[in-house]
Image: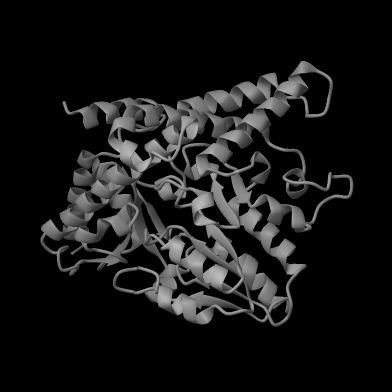
């Protein structure tokens, strides 16, 4: 057994549903983009704090004070995960959608009728509808959509540069498309934002689990991600530059303190969310210590826990690139799929460019429906996919289709699972011919 296989076995042992469901049925889980597998330590951590530290913060009891400690440690964990300068830059929320609406409404207070917002054609609607709401209400002039290449699924960065101007209040883009897997060149987007004196926001919901993130290096003003896409439970976080968070005036109840991050957090904070994310950070720190010898050349500028976290995500990035390559190469090797005669795969399909894509594959099979595809491959091959869906992504509009199927992998998936999936797709195609 190779060292990589040994490590993968260790990793999978920390996810109780990695190989079978709660009823003991063995299956392959390839629906991580809709909600990843959950760590056992996350469930344990949440159960403990909601039972033992249930009193609200601000009381004199030790349980109340422990509640506050849990929240504080969770903020520090996200701070280290993103390499943020201040823990006060970390805001919690119910969902990424809620946080983006919160952000759009807050920025709407400062916008003019001549302003515009720039996003992309492959955004999740969590990063579309909040900005369109400002346009519909006449708060801003318009929302502008940067195009992407239909064949490769990659953002047309020149087009984004052309549609951004001095009236662009914010450029808000996905780090990775949740439908196509396409990785956005965030450094180039950030440069365009700075050239136009625009704010720069990143929807990191489909990014945080796949690539190492450094918000200082990105120089983004906001970065949003969800816990349940990062091996945890429902709930989300938003990083904001401290000075930007302080300058803005979000909607809040009157008694709420007027400083960040609490002025951004509606209602009672969910300490279970913070306990869960702390457990995720602990897991990634553990993984980082396992792989640090392989990643030290790429993480030398970090130290302590931040170095371990970057080591873990750097290894994940490299391993998932291999998974993506194996998937695309496997499609090339299967008769009928190689020329996409029977399967329409949206976005990048060149295995030699697998580094440009997270392991996310959205497709349709001819002569059948996404529902039939997903049901057949689950019943016959025990592979769990998502479909029929649009994945709340605007991307499918570009391909003139409303629904599709999606296979989405994470670092706990294996090459054997890729082979089983590909054989399942081959069988599915033949079955519906």
Q: Residue at x 40, y 70 (%)?
A: 155
Up the image or down, 28 lies above or below 394; here it is above
Q: Quadrant of the N terminus?
A: top left
Q: Nearer the viewer, residue 139 or 185?
A: 185
Q: Nearer the viewer, residue 334 or 99?
A: 99
Q: Nearer the viewer, residue 303 or 171?
A: 303
Up the image or down, 304 lies above or below 314; here it is above
Up the image or down, 211 lies above or below 192; here it is above
Q: Is residue 23 visible?
A: no
Q: Where in the figure is residue 97, as x and y percent of width and height?
A: 61, 56
Compared across the picture, whether 162 is left or right of 342 comes to right
Up the image or down, 384 lies above or below 127; here it is above
Q: Residue at x 32, y 38 (%)?
A: 295
Q: Where in the figure is residue 306, as x and y percent of width and height?
A: 48, 35
Q: Residue at x 77, y 17 (%)?
A: 62
Q: Residue at x 21, y 41 (%)?
A: 415
Q: Where in the figure is residue 305, as x and y percent of width and height?
A: 48, 31
Q: Quadrant of the C terminus?
A: bottom left
């Amino acid at each position: 057994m190779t060292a990589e296989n040994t490590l993968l076995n260790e990793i999978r042992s920390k996810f109780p549903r990695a190989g079978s469901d709660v009823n003991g049925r063995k299956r392959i889980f390839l629906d991580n983009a809709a909600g990843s597998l959950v760590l056992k330590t996350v469930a344990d951590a949440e159960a403990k704090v909601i039972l033992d530290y249930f009193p609200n913060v601000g009381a004199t009891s030790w349980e109340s004070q422990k509640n506050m400690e849990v929240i504080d440690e969770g903020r520090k964990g996200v701070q280290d995960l993103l390499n943020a300068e201040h823990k006060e830059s970390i805001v919690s929320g119910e969902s990424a959608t809620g946080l983006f609406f919160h952000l759009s409404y807050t920025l709407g207070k400062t916008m003019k009728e001549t302003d515009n917002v720039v996003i992309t054609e492959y955004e999740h609607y969590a990063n579309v509808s909040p900005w369109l709401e400002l346009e519909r209400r006449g708060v801003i002039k318009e929302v502008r959509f940067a195009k992407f290449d239909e064949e490769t699924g990659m953002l047309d960065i020149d087009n984004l540069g052309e549609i951004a101007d001095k009236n662009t209040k914010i450029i808000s883009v996905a780090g990775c498309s949740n439908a196509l897997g396409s990785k956005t060149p965030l450094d180039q987007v950030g440069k365009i934002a700075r050239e136009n004196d625009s704010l720069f926001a990143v929807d990191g919901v489909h990014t945080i689990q796949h690539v190492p993130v450094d918000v200082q290096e990105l120089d983004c003003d906001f970065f949003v991600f969800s816990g349940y896409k990062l091996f945890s439970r429902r709930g989300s976080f938003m990083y904001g530059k401290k000075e930007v968070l302080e300058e803005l005036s979000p909607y809040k109840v009157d008694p709420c303190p007027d400083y960040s991050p609490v002025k951004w957090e509606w209602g009672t904070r969910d300490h279970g969310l913070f306990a869960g994310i702390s457990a995720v950070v602990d897991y990634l720190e553990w993984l980082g210590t396992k792989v640090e010898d392989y990643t030290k050349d790429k993480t030398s500028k970090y130290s302590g826990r931040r170095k371990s976290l970057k080591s873990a995500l750097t290894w994940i990035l490299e391993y998932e690139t291999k998974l993506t390559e194996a998937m695309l190469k496997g499609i090339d090797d299967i008769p009928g799929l190689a020329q996409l005669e029977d399967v329409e795969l949206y976005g990048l399909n060149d295995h030699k460019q697998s580094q440009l894509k997270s392991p996310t594959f959205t497709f349709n099979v001819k002569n059948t429906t996404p529902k039939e595809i997903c049901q057949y491959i689950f019943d016959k091959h025990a592979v769990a996919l998502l479909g029929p869906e649009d994945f709340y992504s605007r991307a499918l509009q570009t391909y003139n289709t409303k629904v599709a199927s999606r296979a989405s992998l994470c670092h706990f998936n294996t090459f054997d699972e890729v082979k089983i999936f590909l054989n399942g797709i081959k069988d599915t195609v033949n079955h519906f011919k």
